Structures are given as C-alpha cells and as structure tokens.
Image (tube, rainbow, N blue to C red):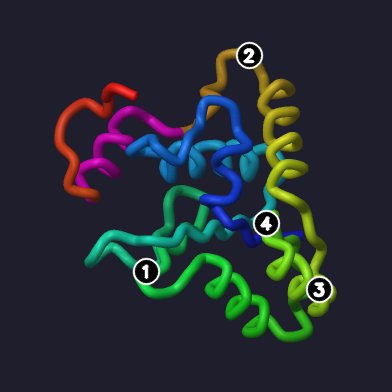
C-alpha cells in the first residue's frame, strides 16, 4: 500500500529531526528512503512553503517529494491528491496528524496513520536495519546539493 505523507507534520516526531534545521526535509527523505528499502512501499511526501522557484515534484531516489508553492498548504495538496485518486484512494495510506486531512482520507476509504504512529514505525524499522547500513540513506553530498538548491552555502552547522 503506497503512502501519502505530510512531511512537516512528521518531522517533529522523529529523533534528531527538527523543523528548525536547514536540511530537515532532506533528512526526512533519508528516513523515507530507508523505509522504502525495507518495505518496498511507494512514498510521496508533501512539504509546504517551498522557496520561490523550487515548488514542484522532485524524485529523490525512491521517494517522490512534492514541494507545495507558497499560498497553498501540504494539507490542501494532500486533499487534492486524494480527490485525484478517486476510488483508488482506498489503496493508499495517509500519514498526517491533521484531523481534517484524516477525516477526508477516511471519507475516501484511505488508511490513516497519525504522524506519531508512523514515526514509531520508522524508528522500529531503523532499529531492525542490518548493521553497517546507513540509517538516513542521505549522503553528505546529497545534503550539500539540497542546501545549494535552497541558496545555502557551505556547512549546515549553525547555532541553535
């Protein structure tokens, strides 16, 4: 069963991730790539507040990341995607803690998981990962490319 995920809703529920990090989206994509490697489930993750010129769909390894343009929200984009799926929505799982998104997903007969419940699954899968395999699935080069796309240069270190 494929997954539709509200990315910014999920980030605060994962250890080591914070919405205040410059590379929070890319780090989440790393978690989702590891999830895909272990489950072979299709993943689409939605992020709102895309920087100017960066909105749109990106294939990042095995994960499809949708960056929602300013003026829309990930919730709205998820609802549109569910509506576009029609009867096939029942074959998808929606990951969000937003009650309205959950209600609309249930109305389409999609499965629903809260962000907290899905984060617990991701953490459990990470624990079961074979030794020596990278947990995030994201290389430093990938992170730097991501930062370059957002206009950030150099090391991602910063004071908090």
Q: Which residue is mark 4?
A: 96
State the separation of the CA atoms marked 4 and 2: 30 Å
State the separation of the CA atoms marked 4 and 3: 16 Å
Mark in front: 1 vs 4: 4
Q: Which residue is painted at 75% across and 28% down in the image?
A: 124
Viewer-side residue, 35 vs 51: 51
Q: Which residue is mark 2?
A: 131
State the separation of the CA atoms marked 1 and 4: 20 Å
Is residue 118 left or right of 31 when viewed as pictured?
right
Q: Position of residue 20 (x, y in %)?
A: 40, 37
Q: Which residue is mark 3?
A: 90
Q: Which residue is mark 1?
A: 56
What is the crowding at mark 3: few (fewer than 14 residues within 10 Å), some, or many (at least 20)?
some
Q: Earlier in the sequence, mark 1 or mark 2?
A: 1
* Residue 112 vertical position relative to residue 125 in the rendered view, above or below: below
Viewer-side residue, 9 vs 63: 9
Q: Secondary structure at mark 2?
A: loop
Q: Which residue is painted at 46% across and 48% down in the image?
A: 61
Q: Earlier in the sequence, mark 3 or mark 1?
A: 1
Mark in front: 1 vs 2: 1
């Amino acid at each position: 069963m494929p997954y539709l995920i509200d990315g910014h809703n999920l980030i605060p529920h994962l250890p080591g991730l914070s919405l205040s990090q410059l590379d929070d989206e890319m780090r989440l994509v790393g978690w989702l790539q590891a999830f895909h490697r272990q489950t072979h489930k299709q993943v689409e993750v939605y992020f709102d507040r895309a920087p100017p010129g960066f909105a749109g769909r990106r294939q990042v390894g095995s994960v499809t990341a949708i960056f929602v343009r300013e003026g829309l929200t990930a919730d709205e984009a998820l609802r549109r995607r569910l509506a576009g799926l029609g009867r096939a929505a029942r074959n998808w799982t929606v990951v969000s803690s937003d009650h309205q998104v959950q209600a609309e997903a249930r109305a389409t007969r999609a499965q629903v998981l809260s962000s907290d419940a899905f984060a617990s699954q991701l953490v459990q899968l990470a624990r079961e990962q074979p030794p020596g395999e990278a947990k995030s699935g994201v290389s430093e080069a990938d992170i730097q490319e991501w930062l370059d796309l957002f206009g950030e240069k150099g090391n991602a270190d910063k004071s908090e």
